């Protein structure tokens, strides 16, 4: 079977800044890949190129055998790739239920009833069925992020991208989001996760990828990576983030 | 749409209806020179409201279109939008109204407009230019993550605008749009310069025929004040439904 995501020699420039310097990354179907690295290393930029929120400057990205470029391909890929953001980005003028049903009804043409049933199932899955008719602002950060995950899942994506999903959460809310992500990983979803949660990476990731200065410095199976990092730079980074 | 949201609209309609129902009998109770001219003043007030409603309605869409052109991918469209807004904001409204009535038919023979249409056209363009700045600010105040979330869910550019960006931008924009509409109602008095019979021109005629400027112009001012107060009241109602 072909891989779900194949990024070949991906470069990205912002003006003169060379942010991504030739990223090669393949993600198999059902694989959970966690990307870690210091801030400014390009990990968020890279995950954003995977559904073209940032257009890559050079190289090719193929998702589910479709090459990522502007035009009809892009719509096809965006329907298959779900994304969860650091700042949730729920639609504040819509109820929780409407947040989830918007895309299935407008993009896929699902009936309102079917979309609402789907939404309620997903809200139950992420553990907050009681908040369907509230506005996002009435929920806690952890609950909002779980709605955002449900909203992305409502499009029945083949890949889920998580861009630092717990970084703007209060500490006591991190686990409720991570456990939803863990359940999703166990269900066989292909996931790419940018995070600073090393516990999650160690427990859930099939593979850990370490970004530094716009390049992949080191990658490997989670156990290997954490117990036996090869590069000095990785050891220093892990020492800094795991110490506390 | 919930009842709470349309309440300001219903309220505005009811108040305006009451205003026009009440204005005739009330003016009839007043002494000379108001009561003999009550109908003229009422018709003037109706014309003012009509002119404001039509140019305000058109100005809403002109403003939105100019704001969208300002965000267009093509530089020429952005330049066009900037040019219209600068031209309108940089010239007096009185000149714009005179231009639309007297000069436009010379330049473009098919644009020969009667008094009402010329005034409505100039006022719509004028308020549209100011509205475009309001919409621009409103659209800019929507967080950029909103569009990213919408696009990454597979919604197209137009869908994202209609369902995600615009409703949020409109919420930010409504109070200043309401201000522009109130200004428009007052500015519509400049239509008297091309002989369009509205409230100000009605007042000015009665005043010069009766040689009694104090009661006549006071009445006219009070009628304008009543109309703007109705609009201010509705704006307050709307803002309260937002809490």
Image: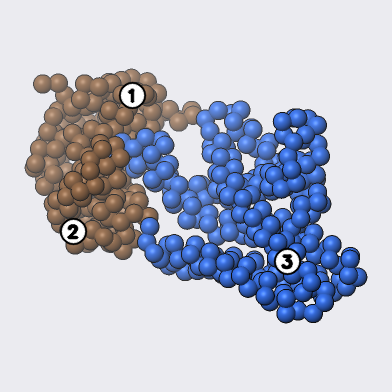
Q: Is residue B240 left or right of residue A231?
A: right
* Left or right: residue B12 compared with residue A62: right
For the residues tagged 3 and 2, is the chain the same?
no
The nearer-to-camera label among 2 and 1 is 1
Q: Which residue is mark 1?
A: A72
Q: Is residue B71 left or right of residue B86?
A: left
Chain identity for the colour brown used in the image: A
How far is mark 2 from mark 1, CA to CA? 35 Å
Per the model, the C-alpha gap separating discs 3 and 2 is 63 Å
* Residue B230 in view in this figure: no
Q: In the image, are marks 2 and 1 on the same chain?
A: yes
Picture residue at 19% right of the left edge, 38% below the top:
A156
Chain of residue at mark 3: B
Residue B143 % position (x, y): 43, 48
Across and down, in percent, residue A144 comes to 27, 55
What residue sits right under mark 2 in the picture? A128
Q: In this picture, is A50 found above or below A69? A: below
Please identify the quadrant where the C terminus of chain B is shown: bottom left
Report the residue at 71% width, 48% height from top. Answer: B116
Which residue bears the numbered disc 3?
B39
Please tell me in which quadrant of the rendered image residue B218 appears. Answer: bottom right
Other-residue count near label 3 (Cα within 10 Å), few / some / many at <14 / 14–19 / ≥20: some
Image colour for chain B is blue
Helix, strand or loop at disc 1?
A: helix
What percent of the width, then of the height, locates residue A59? Answer: 33, 19
A220 sits to left or right of B114:
left
Secondary structure, mark 2, is loop
């Amino acid at each position: 079977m072909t891989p779900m995501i194949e990024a070949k020699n991906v470069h990205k420039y912002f003006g003169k800044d060379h942010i991504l310097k030739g990223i090669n990354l393949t993600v198999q179907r059902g694989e959970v890949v966690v990307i870690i690295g210091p801030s400014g290393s390009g990990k968020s930029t890279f995950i954003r190129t995977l559904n073209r929120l940032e257009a890559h400057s050079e190289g090719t990205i193929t998702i589910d055998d479709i090459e990522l470029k502007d035009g009809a391909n892009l719509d096809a890929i965006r329907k298959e790739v779900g994304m969860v953001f650091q700042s949730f980005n729920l639609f504040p003028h819509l109820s929780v239920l409407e947040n989830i049903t918007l895309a299935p009804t407008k993009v896929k043409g699902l009936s309102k009833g079917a979309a609402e049933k789907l939404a309620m199932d997903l809200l139950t899955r992420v553990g907050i069925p009681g908040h369907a008719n509230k506005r996002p602002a009435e929920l806690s950060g952890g609950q909002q992020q779980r709605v955002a995950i449900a909203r992305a899942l409502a499009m029945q994506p083949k890949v889920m991208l998580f861009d630092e999903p717990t970084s703007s959460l209060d500490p006591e809310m991190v686990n409720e989001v991570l456990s939803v992500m863990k359940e999703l990983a166990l269900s066989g979803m292909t996931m790419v996760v940018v995070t600073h949660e090393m516990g999650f990476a160690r427990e859930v990731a099939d593979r850990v990828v370490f970004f530094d200065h716009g390049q992949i410095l080191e990658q490997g199976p989670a156990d290997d990576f954490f117990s036996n990092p090869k590069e000095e730079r990785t050891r220093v980074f892990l020492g800094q983030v795991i110490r506390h | 749409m919930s009842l709470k949201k349309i309440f300001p609209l219903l309220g505005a309609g009811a108040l305006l209806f009451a205003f026009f129902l009440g204005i005739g009998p009330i003016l009839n109770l007043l002494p000379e020179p108001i009561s003999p001219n009550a109908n003229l003043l009422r018709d003037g007030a109706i014309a003012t409201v009509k002119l404001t409603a039509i140019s305000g309605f058109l100005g809403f869409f002109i403003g939105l279109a100019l704001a969208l052109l300002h965000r267009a991918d093509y530089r020429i469209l952005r330049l066009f939008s900037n040019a219209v807004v600068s031209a309108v904001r940089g010239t007096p409204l009185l000149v714009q109204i005179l231009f639309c009535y007297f000069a436009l038919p010379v330049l473009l023979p098919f644009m020969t407009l009667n008094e009402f249409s010329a005034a409505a056209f100039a006022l719509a363009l004028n308020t549209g230019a100011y509205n475009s700045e309001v919409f621009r600010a409103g659209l800019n105040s929507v967080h950029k993550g909103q569009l990213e979330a919408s696009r990454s869910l597979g919604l197209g550019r137009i869908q994202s605008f209609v369902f995600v960006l615009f409703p949020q931008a409109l919420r930010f924009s409504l109070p200043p749009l309401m201000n522009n509409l109130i200004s428009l109602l007052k500015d519509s008095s400049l239509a008297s310069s091309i002989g369009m019979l509205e409230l100000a021109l009605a007042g000015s005629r009665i005043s010069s025929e009766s040689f009694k400027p104090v009661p006549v112009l006071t009445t006219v001012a009070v009628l304008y004040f009543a109309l703007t107060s109705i609009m201010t009241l509705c704006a307050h109602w709307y803002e309260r439904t937002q809490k």
